[in-house]
């Protein structure tokens, strides 16, 4: 459903016209819809069995620390996250442009040696067992690349992606098309909250019941649409 259809659906759910819905401004309506969209994307990530179902991929150069100063991307092995990152899932790094190795996540609070000096970092960590630490909306690759020359696409990232806002002519694509009406229900609920005195107790009760049905349908779909049950067959030697 495109944005204009979602608005029409919302008006109908509470028997309102555009002028009497919320503050009467479609600009506000779309701001609220996109906020609600973000909340529903987080719901999907929370309940989905397959945590890799909406993964995005990105690469960036592994930058040599040679000549860098504080504030430069790559200084001390620290790099900015992709702008649309919600949650990092997997990191791989290549120090030679040939072989990529998965980084294990670590907490630098457990590192009793330097987190500042490149030479020490290079000796305290191994390129054959790289690590990544998340901090201040960025990530640190350990060990950093302290030799001259950048590695093109030397860092590979998999991450949960932040949704893109939709408009009157576009749809919330990260929600299954058959379930996008949940946003109309969510927006209509904001109208009831804002103007609760205009609705009877019975109207509110009926609305809440139907809204709950829509939400249950939405959550149930994402809990079960990508089943991950697997059977494993083991072969073993019977020595008896």
Image (tube, rainbow, N blue to C red):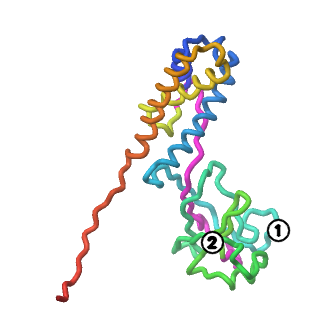
Magenta-colored stretch includes residue 108: no
- Residue 93's place in the image compared with 117, above or below, is above
Magenta-colored stretch includes residue 152: yes
Mark 1 or mark 2, whichever is nearer to me: 2
Majority secondary structure of magenta residues: loop
Instruction: Identify which residue, 97 or 45, lies in the foreground.
Output: 45
In the picture as drawn, the residue positioned furthest to the right comes out as: 70
Instruction: Identify which residue, 169 or 234, lies in the foreground.
Output: 234
**Crowd around label 2: few <14 · some 14–19 · many ≥20 (10 Å):** some
Quadrant occupied by the C terminus: bottom left
User: If you read the primary sequence from the N terminus, does the residue marked by circle 1 or circle 2 appear first?
Assistant: 1
Q: Which residue is mark 1?
A: 69
Image: magenta residue range:
143-171
Q: Which residue is mark 2?
A: 106
In the picture as drawn, the residue positioned furthest to the left comes out as: 240
Query: Residue 47's mark?
Result: none
Residue 177 in which image quadrant: top left
């Amino acid at each position: 459903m495109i944005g204009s259809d979602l608005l029409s659906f919302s008006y109908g759910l509470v028997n309102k016209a555009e002028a009497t819905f919320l503050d009467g401004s479609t600009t506000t309506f779309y701001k609220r819809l996109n906020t609600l969209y973000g909340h529903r994307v987080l719901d999907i990530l929370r309940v989905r069995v397959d945590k890799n179902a909406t993964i995005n991929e990105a690469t960036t150069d592994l930058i040599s620390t040679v000549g860098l100063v504080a504030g430069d991307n790559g200084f001390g092995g620290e790099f900015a996250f992709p702008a649309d990152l919600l949650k990092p899932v997997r990191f791989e790094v290549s120090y030679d442009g040939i072989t990529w190795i998965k980084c294990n996540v670590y907490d630098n609070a457990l590192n009793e040696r330097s987190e500042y000096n490149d030479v020490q970092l290079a000796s305290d960590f191994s390129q054959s067992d790289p690590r990544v630490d998340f901090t201040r909306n960025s990530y640190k690759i350990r060990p950093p690349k302290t030799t001259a020359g950048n590695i093109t696409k030397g860092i590979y990232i998999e991450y949960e992606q932040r949704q893109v806002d939709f408009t009157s002519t576009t749809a919330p694509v990260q929600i299954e098309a058959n379930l996008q009406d949940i946003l109309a229900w969510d927006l209509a609920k904001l109208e009831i909250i804002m103007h609760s005195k205009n609705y009877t107790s019975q109207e509110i009760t009926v609305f809440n019941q139907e809204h709950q049905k829509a939400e249950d349908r939405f959550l149930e779909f994402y809990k079960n649409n990508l089943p991950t049950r697997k059977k494993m067959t083991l072969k073993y030697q019977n020595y008896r």
